Amino acid sequence: MVKGVIFDMDGVLIDSEWYYQKRREEFFRRMDFPCPANSFVGSNERAIWEALVPEDPEFRQEMLMGYRAYRHLHPVPYGELLNPLVPGLFRTLRERGLKIGIASSSYLGAVKEVVRLAGAEALVDFCISGEQCAAHKPDPEIYLRAMEALGLTPETALAVEDSPTGITAARRAGIRVLALRPRPELVLDQSAADGVLDRLDGLLDYL
């Protein structure tokens, strides 16, 4: 019996993956840097830049600092990207007595801002960011810690993800995982998920 749901944030609670990809591509063009084919959906900052600049740590750090400055000038419009189904879904889950957690590779401040914009501060029981973990997804640490904080077990938890990286992390933690289908322009392998959702509130059918 499911007693709690743990959500990824990017690509699940907010439709942000396309925005991150577009912002990176614009930065690469400004820097005359080859634009990679990989969209890096579900990845984290360290892994992304190690993949982009694998053999030159000094140049990698320069690019990273430049991108952080560019990112600061082009902040994510979280309010515009928020999935409109989130507030109602969270209320329904709470009315059913389920715990609600968020386990995201994004910064904790970003996670808390999305929760605030959704008006869900009183509904979300626990948030954890990849920056708080020793290892990022696909390592299961973030899900193991979320389950512990929420008082859940693999048998009583359900995860909602979008990326192969996140799906793998949840499965390695022993959790049943549903994948939210992405935009058509984002091609993601979601075959390892236990089910694929066309709409976020479709997870209610699995409870």
Image (tube, grey):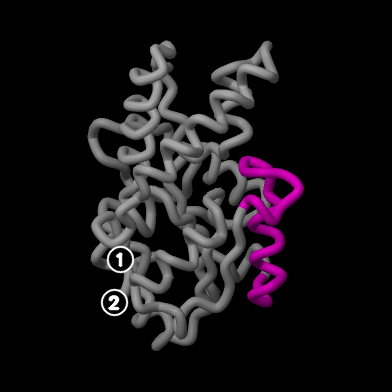
Name the image quarter holding the N terminus.
bottom right
Question: In percent of the image, x 46 and y 40: which residue is there?
Answer: 163
The residue carrying pointer 1 sits among few (fewer than 14), some (14 to 19) or many (20 or more) residues within 10 Å by Cα, namely some
Q: Residue at x 34, y 70 (%)?
A: 117
Pointers 1 and 2 in contact (C-beta within 8 Å): yes
Total marks in image: 2
- The answer to whether residue 137 is above or below residue 58 is below
- Image coordinates for residue 56, horizontal then vertical, percent: 67, 13
Q: Nearer the viewer, residue 80 or 15?
A: 80
Q: Is residue 87 left or right of residue 3?
A: left
Residue at mark 1: 201
Element on which disc 2 rests = helix
Q: Earlier in the sequence, mark 1 or mark 2?
A: 2
Residue 152 in the image, given as x and y percentages of width and height: 65, 72
Crowding at mark 2 (Cα within 10 Å: few <14, some 14-19, many 20+): few
Q: Is residue 47 found inside the magenta-colored segment of the image? A: no
The stretch of residues the image draws in magenta is 130-152
Query: Which quadrant, please, contains the C terminus?
Result: bottom left
Q: Does residue 134 belong to the magenta stretch?
A: yes
Indicate which disc residue 88 carries: 2
Percent position (x, y) of residue 145? Answer: 70, 63
Instruction: Name the spot of residue 184 as percent of width and height, x first.
Output: 23, 35
At label 1, which amino acid type do we have?
Answer: Asp
